[in-house]
Amino acid sequence: MKLRLWPKSLIGQLVFAVAVMLFVAQAVNFVLLSRSQKQQTLAHGGGMAVARIIDAMDRQQRGLPDIEGGHDERRGSRREPKVWIDAVPPPVPQRAVPLPDLAAYVGNLLAEANIPTEGVQAWALPQRPRLGRTHLPGRTVLVAARIGGRYYGVRSRVLMGGTRLQGFLVWQTLSLYLLLLVPVMLIAWRAARPLRDLTRAARANPALRDTTPLDEEGPSDVRDLIAAFNAYRLRIATMLSDKDRMLGAVGHDLRTPLASLRVRVEGIEDDKLRDKMIASIDEMTAMLSDILALARSGAGTEAQERVPLRELIAELAADYRERGKDVAVGEVADVHVLVRPMLLKRALRNLADNAIAYGVRARLSVTAAEGRARIVVSDEGPGLTAEQIRTLIEPFARGEQSRNRATGGAGLGLSIARDIAEGEGGALTLANRTGGGLDAMIELPVQA
């Protein structure tokens, strides 16, 4: 499974980007501070060692006694000398750790002081318990420089503050995260909240004609976007209203001549010719009604109601049985949906009519899962191919290829049902059932 690190939301992306940049900045800061601390440690320990070496050489040249206590004078003393001057290298404990950086630093300082060296070495000496004495910070180091055939060995102390530096950087990073991420999250949340409202409004069906403008809030760019969306939605609602008025006028103007033509056809004496003409006029009138219904689906003035599906399905099935249609009711879940009941009944009637026409009988059932109600209209027909399932929900598409209304109408029933389902916030799907038959399912959100 592919791990997706980049978040999808605006707040997540801003917080993630700031966190990554802050981590990179702290990493660079850690490297710079580590180098600075290393230079400070070398300067402290190496500078002290060089000062003692130069002081010991100066005392030897002037014939002064070594106040630090040299090897020749303190050989038998229990106290280890701080300055070692001898022809042989100073003794180094077995657990001593070489410090090449410190040795190079001391060599450079001696070179800058015009003191030629034949080699410089440095070691970190092992820690020793200091019973009854105050523990000194850092570690003791031994620096040995060979100058003029003699070894000058000095002891010094260097500070080892790596743990303290790491602790400081951890607390600094946490403090910066709190100081920066919290304001960034607040700003991102303020910008994302109106965007979420805008997304919900954009996903709504424009046929609902909801022209209530969204509140223009958030950053200026977001306010401009919301203002543009409000104006855009208002234009869509105006265009849809104009379309409805135009379709109403077209329907009225076409029905009037069709009715007049029907009256005139009634006077034709040839019964066979008269019946064919009347059937053609009736087919044109029915097709006109279907086209107007498809164009106006979801755009009516009916208000949404909280409808119990159990009662709606029982009422619909009873109406079909009164007309002698074979429509049965299966298992129906006790759920409610927020819909326009007349439009939903029309969509279910279209599906039931198709089931009766092509699948012998219809069976209605309702299931509910994951906050969605599924109204299923099943038939016992031969089913459909994948290509037919894909194309039949389009306008004027028919499973039966003739244009005879007695075998299925104009091919608008499924398109009307689909538009109604989408207008109520749901969807229409067709699927072949195992064992034969077709299931037409309208899925709607459940209302608590």
Image: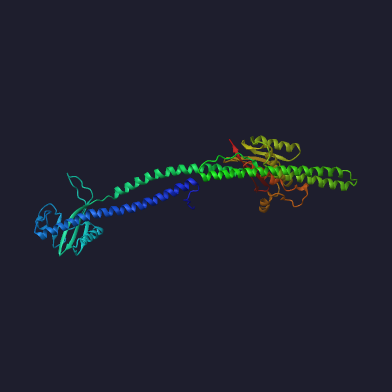
Q: Is residue 351 visible?
A: no
Q: Is residue 206 left or right of residue 101?
A: right
Q: Is residue 247 above or below residue 28?
A: above
Q: Position of residue 126 (x, y in %)?
A: 21, 53
Q: Position of residue 286 (x, y in %)?
A: 77, 44
Q: Position of residue 195 (x, y in %)?
A: 53, 44
Q: How many marks?
A: 0
Q: Is residue 412 left or right of residue 133?
A: right
Residue at image location 44% in from the left, 49% down from the top: 17
The image quarter in which residue 227 lies: top right
Residue at image location 73% in from the left, 41% down from the top: 326
Q: Position of residue 148 (x, y in %)?
A: 15, 64
The image quarter in which residue 141 lies: bottom left
Q: Nearer the viewer, residue 235 or 118?
A: 235
Q: How is the image coloured?
A: rainbow
Q: Nearer the viewer, residue 215 or 11?
A: 215
Q: Is residue 137 visible?
A: yes
Residue at image location 25% in from the left, 53% down from the top: 41
Q: Is residue 429 above or below residue 147?
A: above
Residue at image location 81% in from the left, 44% down from the top: 257
In which quadrant will I find the C terminus? top right
